[in-house]
Image (tube, rainbow, N blue to C red):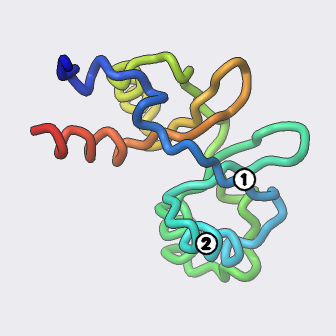
Amino acid sequence: MERRDVHSMRVEELMTKYVLMVEPEMRVADVMSRMLEHNFRCVIVGDRYRELGLVTRFDILEKVIGAGKDPLKVRVVDIMEKPLVYIDASATVGEAAKLMGSNQICNLPVRKNGETVGIIGSTDIFNEYVKRY
């Protein structure tokens, strides 16, 4: 079997295939609890009709804890990164890395046929490089 370079792999091969969605009005403390429970670095903020933004552990540390705000009072809608930048599941990992770099983000929701099917993060890409080299 031929060993492909990570750069040319498809996003769907490395993405996390489970997406954690949270309601915009949820409090940061509750969201962080869910993230820790599932060992997720980010969540998508949305309602029944649309995806609104993304919140990472770093967002919580920087915008809530570091700013001295109460995570029991702050809503995730108030700290989420928006607009969402998506990548198609069939795109290459190299394309994902370029998109992350040009937008200065570390996580991309992955779409297939218009539906969000996963998330790929810079950590996923980095870990794959480490495994191979």
Q: Is residue 77 left or right of residue 105?
A: right
Q: Position of residue 50 (x, y in %)?
A: 83, 37
**Residue 64, percent from left and from top:** 59, 72
**Residue 105: x percent and y percent?**
45, 40
Badge 2 amino acid:
Met
Vertical arrangement, residue 102 with respect to residue 21, above or below? above
Q: Quadrant of the N terminus?
A: top left
Check disc 2: other Cα within 10 Å, few if <14, some if 14-19, many if 20+.
many
Residue identifier under label 1? 21
- The residue at which mark 2 appears reads as 32
Q: Is residue 61 left or right of residue 114?
A: left
Label 1: few (<14), some or many (≥20) within 10 Å? some
Q: Secondary structure at mark 2?
A: helix
Q: Secondary structure at mark 1?
A: strand
Q: Residue 89 location, x and y as percent?
A: 54, 23
Nearest-to-viewer mark from 2 and 1: 1
Residue at 36% from the left image edge and 25% from the top image edge = 93
Task: Identify the residue at horizontal 58%, vertical 73% (top origin).
Answer: 37
- Does residue 82 lie above or below 11 as drawn? below
| Residue furthest left in the image | 133
Seen at 53% across and 77% down, the residue is: 65
Indicate the amino acid at tag 1: Met
Q: Nearer the viewer, residue 50 or 34?
A: 34
Q: Which numbered dot is residue 115?
A: none
